[in-house]
Amino acid sequence: MKHMLTAFYARPIASCLIASLLVISSLAGPAEAMLIPASAGGPSYTGQSVPSLDRAADIAMIQKTLEAKEVQQRLMDYGLTPEETAARIDTLSDEQLHQLASNLDSVQAGGDVLGLFFGLALIALIVVLIIFLLQGRIEIKRT
């Protein structure tokens, strides 16, 4: 093992691995998944019927979210008046309305802070790894 770490090819391979890890991790998008809802009101694969979607409750939840000043301002920035927004919500099907209402819980106002933290921790780890591989031989020359 010691010979492998001191071999002439160890540093170039480590550098290539670090560079490829950075490229791959920067290109990766967010992974999203959700359950596929069974058909509303029809029989499911277990033979039991699925309760129908409650359109009034979904509309009430969406309206409650749309009443927030930040959401109203953002919609106005996009050029949508409250009347246009209500008209568009009324044209949605029951499944679309239910999906929108269920996804409102997962909306984050400030963004994903946890992802930022892990990104910064990964960068710090890579810097420490580079310093370790260089065995502290970092020189800063002024010209």
Image (cartoon, rainbow, N blue to C red):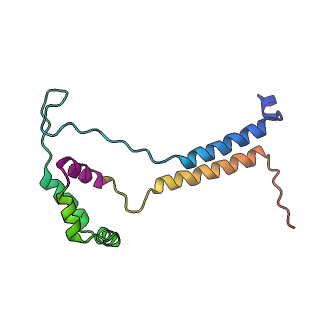
Mainly helix, strand or loop, the magenta region? helix
Label count reads: 0
Seen as rendered, the residue at the extreme right is 143
Q: What residue is shown at x 34% (from left), y 56% (from top)?
A: 107
Direction from residue 109 to residue 60 in the image, left or right: left
Q: Is residue 102 magenta?
A: yes
Instruction: Report x, y in % for residue 131.
Output: 74, 49
User: Which quadrant: the C terminus?
Assistant: bottom right
> In this image, 110 relative to 58: left or right?
right
Residue 104 occupies which quadrant of the picture? bottom left
> Which region is colored magenta?
92-105
Q: Nearer the viewer, residue 95 or 63?
A: 95
Toward which corner of the image does residue 57 lie, by quadrant?
Answer: bottom left
Image spot of residue 27 (x, y percent): 55, 48
Front residue of 118 and 69? 69
Task: Report the residue at 32% width, 42% height from top.
Answer: 34
Q: Residue at x 24, y 53 (%)?
A: 101
**Looking at the image, which residue is at 21% across and 36% down?**
38
* Depth order, front residue of 35/120: 35
Please identify the quadrant where the N terminus is shown. top right
* Residue 132, placed above or below residue 13: below
34 is within the stretch colored magenta:
no
118 displayed left or right of 93? right
x, y percent for residue 99: 25, 49
